[in-house]
């Protein structure tokens, strides 16, 4: 299982802005992150599944 930092997530989904990513989180288009200390991380497989679903 690989975790993505915010910067890695941003690169994976095409360089979208911070506000766009947080809007997608609020609307349920992206999975919620996991918090480790003060940082947020996303499970890469969950992001891949969300992107595949959005394409269909």
Image (spheres, rainbow, N blue to C red):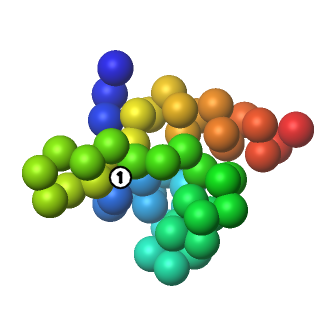
User: Where is residue 47 drawn, in percent x and y?
Assistant: 54, 39
Q: Quadrant of residue 23?
A: bottom right
User: Where is residue 14 drawn, in percent x and y?
Assistant: 56, 61
Could you tell me how many numbered marks the image carries?
Answer: 1
Q: Is residue 33 above or below residue 45?
A: below
Tell me which residue sits at (67%, 42%) in the image. Answer: 51
User: Where is residue 32 drawn, in percent x and y?
Assistant: 48, 48
Task: Judge whether residue 34 can be spotted in this image.
Answer: yes
Q: Please tell me which residue lies in front, 26 or 46.
A: 26
Q: Residues within 10 Å of mark 1 (few under 14, many from 20)?
A: some
Q: Is residue 47 above or below residue 7?
A: above
Task: Judge whether residue 17 can be spotted in this image.
Answer: no
Q: Is residue 26 rendered to the left or right of residue 7?
A: right
Q: Quadrant of residue 39?
A: bottom left
- Which residue position holds label 1? 8
User: Where is residue 35 drawn, in percent x and y?
Assistant: 26, 48
Q: Please tell me which residue lies in front, 4 or 22.
A: 22
Q: Is residue 19 rendered to the left or right of residue 28?
A: left
Q: Residue furthest top?
A: 1
Tell me which residue sits at (44%, 61%) in the image. Answer: 10
Quarter occupied by the C terminus? top right
Q: Which element is circle 1 on?
A: helix
Q: Quadrant of residue 48?
A: top right
Q: Is residue 53 rendered to the left or right of residue 15?
A: right
């Amino acid at each position: 299982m690989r975790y993505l930092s915010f910067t890695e997530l941003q690169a994976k989904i095409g360089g979208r802005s911070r506000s766009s990513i947080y809007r997608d989180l609020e609307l349920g288009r992206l999975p919620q992150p996991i918090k480790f200390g003060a940082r947020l991380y996303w499970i890469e497989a969950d992001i891949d599944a969300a992107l595949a679903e959005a394409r269909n």
